[in-house]
Amino acid sequence: MVMWSSVFDGVTMPLRPCILGFFAFVAVLFLWGTSLRAQTPTDFATWKEAKNAENVHAWAGTMLRGFRDLTGVAREELLDKNLLSLKDIIADSNVVPSTRYNAILAAGQLVSTEASPGTMPIAYPAALVYLVDVYQETDCPPYVKYGALLGIVRHALCGIDPSQQERVIDLLLETVGTEPDVNTISSAVGSWFRLTSLEGLAALKTTGAEGKVVTGLLALIHRKAQELDMLRRNQNVFNRQDWEQARRAVELASQAAKTLGDLDYRSATCVNVTEMTGTFAALTQAVCELGNKLAADTIDQKEASPDSALLLEQIVVDTKTCIQSVVWGIRGWFLTGNPGEHSLYASLSSDDPTKKQLDILLAEIVELATFLDEGDRTKRQSPATNAPKAFRFVILELRDAMAKSSEALAQIRGGNDE
């Protein structure tokens, strides 16, 4: 994302007492002139010139800062005027891509009310309507579409216009649940869109009408768990393409699990806790079984190499990413400390049988996490002083731990390996 540059508000200099009055007068004139320049209309025509492309991000920052001291009707009129000019730039296919991208980022940063200490700014509602419309255009270039998505997520973070909330939720869920068209964008770019959409859903915090956000995210996690299982069943040794696909699946499913933990369940309805437990267990099992296969393939090759050491590290990183996200999805917090008051776990009564299911799953995750941090409990030793950091297990032990956890997770799921 483009970051706007900042400017100094003023410069102080030592002054002789006898000329303080003179410089004070000059300062008043200077500030008055600065104020006039800040309110000078932005020359958007110059934005369109290709020779000025490198300057547009700075000009956008200047344009946005020009709203600082404006309120009421004057601010609304300038917001409307500037948004209209930005729309013209964004819609013009003859304008260089970087300028169009910076223009739509600027549209997403327009605010009706500036932030104050302890509060978020109030985003400009008309800009959100426009951003959603642009995002849904079928012929919109991916870079413009992604800029629109960033603006939509910013509105979600600031506090979305209630009249647009359901429309935005549906848009984000559709993006999250749709596999990218590789004829249009790469798988990696598609992942950016989906991960960014998950950020928007996390910011909104709602489980949605009839729990549709929860339902949509669980469906995504289930599909990614199945994708990992299909990759794992492949009899061939993983190639780079298989590995990248698996890593994207783990990342997306893990982020979806974490997003579920960011939602507010205190007044939620239609949330199937049993389904959520089973889905979380299925994802964790799929990641463990994939790690088991990768470790076993390396052992079968009977050779130690830098690649095998890297693979060991990557299996651990992906597994930890998954289990930490699942824990957050359940507790709205880490394993240590009290669960978040808005979390699924906190919303359940102590005698709820579904809470006991979650406790069993959490206990298995704790067991696996402990192994990844400390190794086999029967072989644990205190590391030597100043010893370099290293895993406290070899790849054979990792394979066995992955297999053990997979079996326990299958039992939690009731043997359901769909």
Image (cartoon, grey):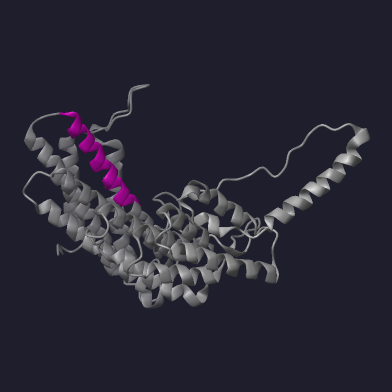
Residue plotted at (40% across, 77% down): 209
Image x and y of residue 385, in percent? 37, 21
Judged left or right of residue 262, residue 73 is right
Q: Among all residues in the image, which is located at the extreme right?
A: 18
User: Residue 308 occupies which quadrant of the picture?
Assistant: top left
* Left or right position of 325 against 123: left
- State which quadrant residue 269 falls in: bottom left
Q: Position of residue 163 (x, y in %)?
A: 50, 77
Q: Nearer the viewer, residue 105 or 309?
A: 105
Measured as percent of width and height from the top left, residue 49 is found at 49, 53
Q: 316 or 277, which lies in front?
A: 316
Q: Is residue 306 magenta?
A: yes
Identify which residue is drawn at 70% across, 45% down. 9
* Badge count: 0
Q: Can residue 353 be seen in this snapshot?
A: no
Residue 82 position, x and y percent, is: 57, 64
* Span of residues in magenta: 305-324
**Rendered view: 65 above or below 179:** above
Q: Residue at x 15, y 56 (%)?
A: 229
Residue 396 seen by the camera: yes
User: Looking at the picture, does residue 20 appear above or below residue 406?
Assistant: above
| Figure quadrant of the C terminus | bottom left
Which of these two is toward me, 78 or 14? Answer: 78
> Eyeballing the image, is 60 above or below 171?
above
Q: Is residue 362 left or right of 236 when viewed as pictured? A: right
Q: Main secondary structure of the magenta part?
A: helix
